[in-house]
Amino acid sequence: MKIILKKDMEKLGKAGEIVETTTGYARNYLIPKGFAVAASAANMKIYEQERLAEQRKTQKEIQEAEAVAAQLDKISITANVQVGEEDRVFGAVTNQHIADLLKEKGFDIDRKKIILEEPLKALGIFEVPIKLHSEVEARIKVWIVRE
């Protein structure tokens, strides 16, 4: 039986491909679970329209992310931290702290998009990457200064 895959299946193929599989596997598992549809002419047209709509949506998201990235590349934020002897920082600047500072500047960025390998624990200037979309990344400057 020929089917159109809606989702990537490890041993069958990628989404959008037309593959040949056994009738029982298609009717009893793939089609009821929503992983595939029968490869009829009508289903092929519908799937092609859905794919084009998804491409347009993704392209729009990328353009919006690039616009935000252009604004974020110009931004630098300052984190005031308490410092002890020999300029040792109490605590650390985390991605949540950076998200809060960005929110004060008018950018609502989810903390999970801010990429820190480990919290910032020293005074200085750091470039922090922000993953806005799978294809778009912005970099902001974070100044860590004593309070």
Image (spheres, rainbow, N blue to C red):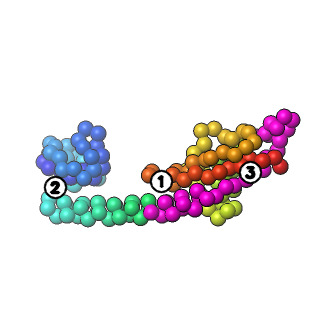
- Say which residue appears at 29% left-offset and 60% top-offset: 51
Q: CA distance from mark 2 to mark 3?
A: 57 Å
Q: CA distance from mark 1 to mark 3?
A: 25 Å
Report if residue 64 lies within the magenta region. yes
Instruction: Find disc 2 in the rendering and name its residue.
Output: 39
Please name the amino acid that badge 1 sits on.
Val
First reached walking from the N terminus: tag 1 or tag 3: 3
Front tag of 2 and 3: 3
Q: In the image, 136: left or right of 104?
A: left
Q: Residues within 10 Å of mark 3 (few under 14, many from 20)?
A: some
* Depth check, front residue: 35 or 112: 112
Residue 136 numbered tag: 1
Q: Is residue 127 at all visible to an observer of this figure? A: yes
Instruction: Find disc 3 in the rendering and name its residue.
Output: 79
Mark 3: which secondary structure?
A: strand
Report if residue 87 lies within the magenta region. yes
Mark 1: which secondary structure?
A: strand
Tell me where residue 107 appears, x and y as whole percent: 61, 62
Q: Which residues are magenta?
A: 63-91
Q: Is residue 24 at all visible to an observer of this figure? A: no
Please name the amino acid that badge 2 sits on.
Ala
